[in-house]
Image (spheres, grey):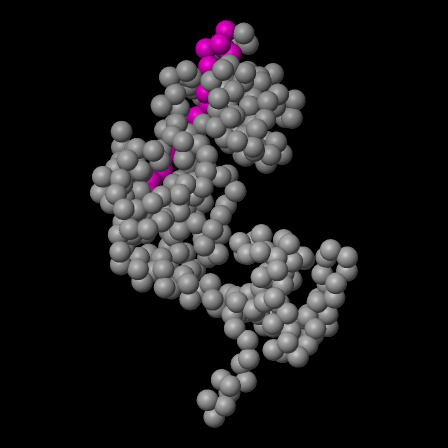
Amino acid sequence: MASRTWQTVRFDWNQARAFLVTAEEGSLSAAARALGLTQPTLGRQVAALEEALGVTLFERLGRSLSLTEPGLELVDHVKAMGEAAGRMSLAASGQSQAIEGQVCITASDLLSVYHLPPVLERLRCIAPEIEVEVVASNEIRDLKRREADIAIRHVRPEQPDLIAKHVRDTTAHLYAAPAYLERHGRPSTVEDLVDSVFVAAGQPDRYLADVRSSGLPLTKANLKYMSDSGVMAWEMVKQGLGMAIMFRDVAELTPEVENVVPDFGTVPVPLWLVTHRELRTSRRIRLVFDVLAEALARDGST
């Protein structure tokens, strides 16, 4: 019975993958770019799947493609196959015992710039065969989809497939450069901040919500400078363009700024190290995870 069942499978995974990515991307050219293939090669794989299954999967509408009714019925099944293939790849990666190969770390641009270089130098001395890719992004990467192997985050993840280690807690305070204070005066209380100029990192509405929850009575009128990049926003603070709330660890590495408004208090900021449960069994990823955990915890004790 089992052998007869297997004989009914008349296509290979490359064909199914070509169909799935083409359905998701909407055209052969976009799917070819996503898979790193030439468009003719991808087209042949899709055509081979149509021939093997005896159905037409796409209708050609100019340069774009539209799923036929059989294609719509099959795409969810192929998505399940893709998820299973991803889990298989993840499990296989987790079984690798070689302390070599690539490990991808994702962290905010501020954490990446100010904290990771000395950690990577220590890792180079311990395991020189490991290749590290750093995704310095303020967007949260999906570890389950292998967009990164290890993430440094300020929020504990809720997904059950992820392992999270609470490395330590840091704090955030209010900082400004002497040049700004000379022009605008030195505020001594939170109430003095009503007319202050602030530099926002990220979306203004989200930034205002965060600072208001910290106790600062700011409005959009206070936000004169903004950037999606935390590093760029911090550089503007260093140049005296405005004030900002910043992690104590980063500010201590920045002699161009000083802590202002003592009665503002402190904002607690947790630091979590996260990886996928399967990848925690990989020696190279476990090593990088442990080196990061030790170094980041030590940073908080200095």
- Above or below, 145 against 265 in this view is below
The answer to whether residue 165 is seen in the rendering is no
- Above or below, 135 against 185 in this view is below
Q: Name the residue located 38 percent from the left edge and 41 percent from the top edge.
A: 271
Q: Is 181 covered by the magenta stretch?
A: yes
Place of residue 33 in the rendered image (x, y in percent of width and height, measured from the top left): 58, 52
Q: Is 161 covered by the magenta stretch?
A: no
Q: Where, by quadrant of the figure, is residue 162 drawn?
A: bottom left
- Above or below, 68 against 139 in this view is below
In this image, 122 relative to 57: left or right? left
Magenta range is 166-182
By secondary structure, the bulk of the magenta-drawn segment is best described as strand
Looking at the image, which residue sits at the far top? 182
Q: Name the residue located 71 percent from the left edge and 61 percent from the top edge.
A: 65
The answer to whether residue 120 is seen in the rendering is yes
Q: Which one is nearer the viewer's eye here, 44 or 20? A: 44
Q: In which quadrant is the C terminus drawn?
A: top left
Q: Where, by quadrant of the figure, is residue 31 drawn?
A: bottom right
Q: Name the residue located 48 percent from the left edge and 21 percent from the top edge.
A: 235
Count the marks. Answer: 0
In this image, 287 relative to 171: left or right? left
